[in-house]
Amino acid sequence: MSTILIGELKQETATFNPAPTTYDDFSVHIGSEMIDAFRATKTELAGVIDAFGVAKIQVAPTLSASAVSGGPIVQADLTRLVDEMLRRAGELRNIDGLYLCLHGAMAGEEEDDPEGLLLTRLREIFPDRPIVASLDLHAVLTDRMIEATDILVPYHTYPHTDHYETGQRAARNLIDLLDGAIHPTVARVKLPMLVRGDELLTATGLFGQAIRMCQEIESTDGGLAAGVFIGNAFTDVPSLQSNVLVATNGDLLQAQTKADRIGRFMWEHRKAFQAKLIPLDEAIAQANRTQGLVVFSDAADATASGAAGDSNAILRGLLESGFRKRAIVPIVDAPAVEQAFAAGVGATISTKLGGTRDTSRFSPLSVAATVTSLHQDPFQYEDGTTARNDRAGVLTIGSVTVLVTERPVYVVGRRVFECHGVNPIDFDLVVVKSPNGFRTWYESIAELIVPVDVPGSTSANLRSLPFKNCVRPIFPLDEQVPSPFESSES
């Protein structure tokens, strides 16, 4: 019976977020705890565990460490995570292959390619074993990632709804590698472009056409894996740009031809892949005029993209405008949670909200609020994974309800509110801290969705951010960006 090493190291980093990510921010599962934590979830790990089970392949779990998207990882803590994974892997010499579940846009305070480092070190330990990794399509693809693996398998959906299926695709490729049935050849096309906006929605936007080209490749004989890695625009590291990656079975020319076709499509439509944002005062006016649920997308402070989560810009705007409809706003503020717990349910407190983490962008907002409820039990996201059991409080300020959390949480689906006793369908306005992932859970109940233009470390207004390290020139940051296909066209 074959044995496959499995491991996970995941966090999406926003380097413009000044609040560092620490070891304590990671949910860590060791050895067999991984199986218990992820079985029956809608994750990549569940997908590979199930696929290997059907194939009668034994899994050797090492370490799973994942954190909510955030600022750069403290270097000592990143080193600890990588070393722990490598140590556990090194104890499993009698294995036949490796599967790694990674995000691809992780960054430390010093190391700007942790996934590439981890994969390279694993390749040194297992020089002749097949290695397959799954990646988010927002991964920042690096040379080290490609060189250290046999096949990289990306998501095909945005919003991301194919985690489990991606794990299954990765597992099938690894099984074929073990059987000697495939011999991967990989082609890559680099695209100097950063993308945002609704055209990235794979069900309805132009990006979906590119992804369907990738799926067509995978569905044909000889097609192993194909994807468009658009990068996380807020992970400002030297390799940040978009990429097309195609793996075929022993046919490099086919892989390159297919990758070029998809790359040309993306490049030709680059101007369409930009976000259209609405100023806050106009967004509030639209909410006042709309009958039914309005969803404000605060992509600039998206904890799903790596922001600090402590923006009070929309909350301040609602209160100062005299907004009278029922609204719910999430915010990260550990001192306010501490104060709410000290006061207890039913108490009215004078507190400050926001500006505790990203202090250069946001200043605390003084409010008088009633403590509606307090929470400390872990809750489950829509994919079945369990959030940390950090504390949270629900505060009421006039018609505005504020979900205040001690640490960043994903404010994407509805369960983050529902599990804290607040149901979005009972409100006129809900603020989500997500650029587009929330649509899976809100489009069916929302009358209007508004992408709001407010400050933040993950703003879709890319020119508002202080890029220093990414590939240059790059669209849309620079006026003149040469086509990556110019040399082949001349």
Image: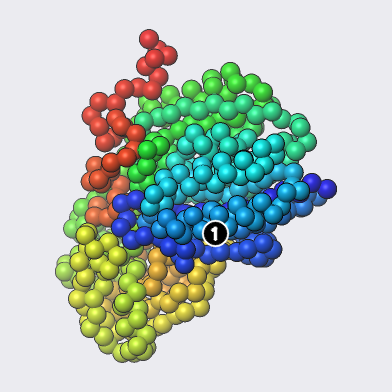
Residue 20 placement, left or right of 93: left
Quadrant of image for the C terminus: top left
430 and 367: which one is in front? 367
Residue 281 placement, left or right of 203: left
Task: Name the residue that disc number 1 marks.
Answer: 65
| Whole-percent x, y for residue 264 in the image | 43, 24
Residue at 32% x, 40% y is 469
Determine if residue 70 is in view: no
355 and 219: which one is in front? 355
Residue at 49% x, 34% y is 143
Label 1 packing within 10 angstroms: few (<14), some (14-19), many (20+):
many
> How many labels sit on residues?
1
| Whole-percent x, y for residue 401 in the image | 32, 74
Identify whether 375 is placed above or below 212. Answer: below
Looking at the rendering, which quadrant does residue 433 occupy?
bottom left
Determine if residue 32 is in view: yes
Residue at 49% x, 74% y is 389
354 and 157: which one is in front? 354
Looking at the rendering, which quadrant does residue 309 occupy?
bottom left
Q: Secondary structure at mark 1?
A: strand
Looking at the rendering, which quadrant does residue 273 occupy?
top left
Tag 1: amino acid: Ala
Residue at 43% x, 29% y is 190
Q: Residue furthest right?
A: 1
| Whole-percent x, y for residue 289 in the image | 24, 61
